Amino acid sequence: MQRNSWIRILMHTWLMTLPMQFGLDVSAQLAESANKKAHRSGGSTFQPNTKMTLNVPKAESALIIDGEIEDTWLQGASFGNFVENGPVEGRQPLAETQGYILFDNDYVYFAFIAYDPEMHKLRANLSDRDRIFRDDFVGVNIDPFGAQTNGFEFFVNPLGIQGDLSVDVNENEDESFDAVWESAAKIYDDRWTVEIAIPFKSLRFPDRQDQNWLIHLWRVYPRENRFLYSWIPINRGKGNQYAQAGQIAMNMEKRPSKPIEFLPYALGSRDRFVKFNGDTTKGIWSKSNYDKNFGFNLKYGITSDMTLDLAYNPDFSQIEADATQISVNNTFALYYNERRPFFLEGRDVFFVDDDLNLMYTRSINDPLLLGKLSGKTDRLSYGYLLGLDENAPYIVPKEEGSRTLLSTNNTTNNTIRAKYELAKGTYVGILGTDRRTSDGSNTVGTIDTKIRINDTYTLSGIVSASTTDEPDATSLYGSTDRFVAFGDSLTYGFNNEKFKGIATRVTLDRTAREWGFFAWFNDRSPGFRSEQGFITNNNVREAGAFSRYTFYMNDDHPLLTRVEPRVRFNRKYNYDGKLKDWWINPQIFLQFKKQTYFWLGVAALNNENFAGKQFNNIHRISFESGTDAFQKLSGGLYGEVGNYINRSGNAEDTFNPLSKIKGVKLTVWATIRPISRLRNDFEFNSASFRKDFGGDLIDQQLIYRNTLQYQFTKRLFLRLIGEMGAINSHRAKRDKNTDDIVLDVNNQQVLDKTHDVFYAISPLMSYKINPFTVFYLGANFMGRNNLDFPNYDGTNLNRTNFFLKFQYLMQI
């Protein structure tokens, strides 16, 4: 009780000092809030729009997209009377928004007029596309098929910079979606305007004359809060945003053609690295290795709702390397997001579930040939993917972790997906994946369904079965650890064994204004594998839930807009019925004014059985805070501190014991924009594990990453990425021949310290006409320590790479 009292006192003191921390005057805020409330009321009762359909006329003449709203727009369907959806629901906005919609044979057009009584507070930065979401922006969210499962968003900031995303019914957004479209904007003394032209060839929609699209029109107004305004109000008590959308109707007497898109690329590079100098142990630089590559993507729109994609020798080298992730004290494979355009387009067709991830396209590592057919007709959406791959990776899931392996195997990958819409937001689907090498294969068949019970509840279910025929490759993975699959005792090593597995996942989601929860049940048998998926552990049966209750503060509250108590719990068993993990995690989330938040979580109960040993009271505290309060500076930090299991520990190693240890994790990030064209993103990640706080070190990892970018124009930028990292580890020294622990003359273990350092510097110039027509000129300079050459002591440059890449989208 005494400890809890101190916590309440500290929290109360912290909350009361927040106004001073952020330079807020509470009395001034109350007065300002009262003034804004009076302004909103305006002496009359505000009435938001109801759901409506706009009949969009066809433009009489071509529109010039230059940001100026000219008389031609007056013939269009008009919209206005926006309503606030956040942080307060159903309120009259502080700033008025109006606009028009038109279409012709090739485009659908949108015009926005964004009035602003505080133009001096306008947030508008000249940046690369998809980097606008801290700015003011307007845009459109469309669901052309009206299936109420997913849609596409097109946003523009006051300088005409684009941002496009895919989005689902619960407003989960994915920035990896890219399309070719036009936009322009213009800023005036009391308003700013935007024109948008979206080509029909960049969209998928029903192949019929009469088009009825679900639509939301949005404006984000970041001031005291991040205000969200929309044309049609959205009730937070209903989980489906598209069930509350308006509609636009267009009569396409002449349906737009779907041209052939041809995207060739050419890549040239020069690479050098430090190597052995003949028979000596000295290191020298290799001769320059010049390489050139050519390939292409071909896209054919068979109809407006069916597309065929082909790619020969596609260039999947990533211009920006994946950021290094914390890996110490982690037994699971690391997940990397997909950023390759071929796989991003139409990815929603193949998606099943994030947790039971059965389609991880980065499992296709170095393809020579790719083909994809995808589309939607009436209630059926479908897709087929073929990939001929070289240097295939493997993820081998185990009960308490996984192994990631990179092979030289060539694989043939086949994926088929179909979903049939039973009702709005309800479907049943199938997924089949098959990967084959010369002497091995993995086949997975899946049935999944999502049932929208009502506007609040959604039930989902997945049943999957796998058959694995391992390659005969013990040199790649020769583990002798064993597991049991359907009564057969097998090894994890690749020794041509055959086995089967099953996986099941059931979830129930309640999405509502105040009370929401998400409950799950997962079951993966020891033999379940998905070589085209991302499955990091099996031999698990678990059930858990997340629940939250949201309190919305009155507008006159001086600090807060939302308070959200939360709780998560999970109970996990293996197939032998052994309780493996059991935790309860209460949390609190606070949304402050000034676009600032704070989150706190406590592992109040956390007991786990790991490596045959029981660990209880693995308590720790996690927290996160961030702010977008300032136009030129944003950032935040995340931290964890408390007890951990030493997952890399060894019972025989006194310096690295298999025991409960102390740990601290910290992530700090910041974005600085001293001027509109210049952006600097900084991120620091660290993880440190010791026997006790202030005691002997076991593992430590530090990662610094900085990205500096100058945007000369909408199309041209210069960027410099610098990354540096270090891993420090303390272990008992082992004999190189026998692997036995080395003892000193006093029969004590000898400490072996390792200190690994790396760095990478990557300058890049990019000229981007659209997401697909791009010119790159760049370089990579990489270095590390421990090069094992006596003439390279310390941390040294050991590899350089210069490259030039050009790709151009042609529409035939």
Image (cartoon, rainbow, N blue to C red):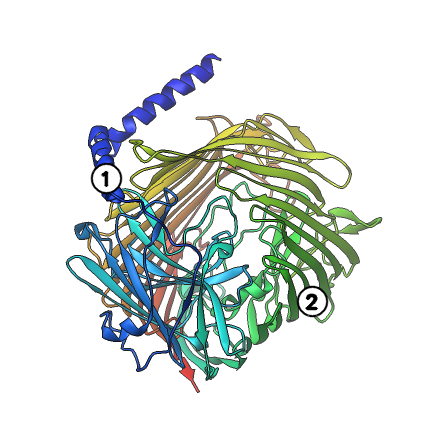
Q: Secondary structure at mark 1?
A: helix
The residue depicted at 50 percent of the width and 71 percent of the height is 342
State the mark number for residue 434.
Answer: 2
In the picture as drawn, the residue positioned furthest to the right comes out as 487
* Residue placed furthest toward the bottom: 812
Q: Give me the C-alpha separation between circle 1 and circle 2.
A: 64 Å
Q: Which mark is residue 540?
A: none
Q: Amino acid at mark 2?
A: Asp
Outermost top residue: 2
Residue 243 visible to the viewer: yes
Position of residue 426 measured from the top left corner of the image (x, y, whole percent):
62, 57
> Percent x, y for residue 512?
51, 42
**Residue 536 screen position, x and y as percent:** 62, 50
Residue neighbourhood size for the residue with mark 2, other residues' Cα within 10 Å, grouped as few (<14), some (14–19), many (≥20): many
Q: Is residue 326 left or right of residue 710?
A: right
Looking at the rendered image, the quarter that the C terminus falls into is bottom left
Camera-side residue of 213 and 465:
213
Q: Is residue 610 above or below residue 215?
A: above
Please, what is the three-letter code of the amino acid marked with disc 1? Ala
* Secondary element type, mark 2: strand
Q: Residues within 10 Å of mark 1 (few under 14, many from 20)?
A: few
Residue visible at 25% across and 34% down in the picture? 22
Q: What residue do we see at 28% from left, 55% from top?
A: 136
Query: Circle 1 sits on which residue?
Result: 38
